[in-house]
Amino acid sequence: WGTDEKAIIAVLGRRNAAQRRQIRHAYEEIYQEDLIKRLESELSGHFEVTNGTIIAKAVYRWILDPPDRDAVLANVELKKSGNKDHVIVEISCTKNPEELLAIRRAYHARYKRSLEEEVAYHTKGDTRRLLVALVSAFRYYGEEINTTLAKSEAKKLHEAIKDKKFGNEDVIRILSTRSIAQLQATFNCYREQEGTSITKNLPKDSSDEYIAMLRMAVRCLKDPKKYFEKVLRRSIEGIGTDEDALTRVIVTRAEKDLKEIKELYHKRNNVPLDKAVDKETSGDYKDMLLTLLGN
């Protein structure tokens, strides 16, 4: 009777995406049943509804193929009321072009609508213009940069920020079309020209949704590891724990750069991330996160 959650965590939590896919296929061949749907019923939760159990969400986010997982995360985010869209920025600005294209295809296959269409429907104004441009991007992914262009566009960004024209067409165009390497060069030129980073010049804690999205996009494009470390820190510090943010970062970065994010977290907070997670979580949920953290 009941489900052995620890066995599920021990098996799935220590397998990479390709292995998890093989396990799902083998399970279906042997039992003529979808493993994800079986887990949905056994763990008494559902990934795509907000009242699902915490451990269920963590397991489902992990067992799905990465593009499908991000497609579901995007859909859940777009259906939220109030302030939202940070997940859309994360997905758009921290994935390489092929990964973002795979997410858009997964979204189309799952929901029978394009991600661009959904973003446009659920947003408005400058926020819509920025997010649609970001999710539609297919950036060059090489290391080549144009120094002259970087200096010119750093100046354009400074002028737009100085004049508080944050929705300027050039701002959205630069952030949504330039390669990561080119943007890094542009941000470095901005610092050299102005004596401060672009994020320092963007308004903090603004009630304007667009400015908040713009600042987040710059942070993700500029230094994604630093961005995710801050998301983890904010999810843990203070009263209560933001399990959704904590789970999202650990699950989505576990097979990418979580090791470097853990090192950065330890350096900035003087405590290992796994110890912080151990203190702030409990039960099977804690076991799942600690397994993904490498414990």
Image: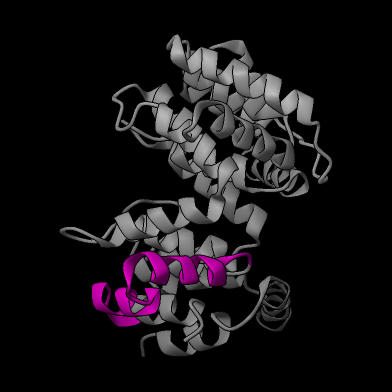
Q: Residue at x 69, y 25 (%)?
A: 151
Q: Residue at x 35, y 26 (%)?
A: 203
- Indicate whether residue 280 is drawn in magenta: yes
Residue 275 place in picture, x, y as percent: 33, 80
Q: Residue furthest left?
A: 239
**Residue in front for this viewpoint, 36 or 270:** 270
**Residue in front for this viewpoint, 196 or 50:** 196
Residue 266 place in picture, x, y as percent: 40, 72
- Indicate whether residue 242 is drawn in magenta: no
Q: How is the rendered protein coloured?
A: one colour
In which quadrant of the rendered view does residue 162 lie?
Answer: top left
In which quadrant of the rendered view does residue 239 lie?
Answer: bottom left
Residue 234 place in picture, x, y as percent: 31, 54
Q: In the shown orientation, is residue 138 left or right of residue 232?
A: right
Residue 127 place in picture, x, y as percent: 48, 21
Q: In the shown orientation, is residue 39 left or right of residue 222?
A: left
Q: Residue at x 76, y 35 (%)?
A: 138
Specify whether residue 167 is in view: no
Q: In the shown orientation, is residue 271 left or right of residue 147?
A: left
Q: In the shown orientation, is residue 210 left or right of residue 35?
A: left
Specify whether residue 272 is in view: yes
Q: Main secondary structure of the magenta part?
A: helix
**Residue in front for this viewpoint, 18 or 141:** 141
**Which quadrant is home to the N terminus?**
bottom left
**Residue in front for this viewpoint, 275 or 56:** 275
Query: Is 121 situated above or below 257?
Result: above
Q: Residue at x 51, y 48 (%)?
A: 73
Which stretch is magenta?
256-284
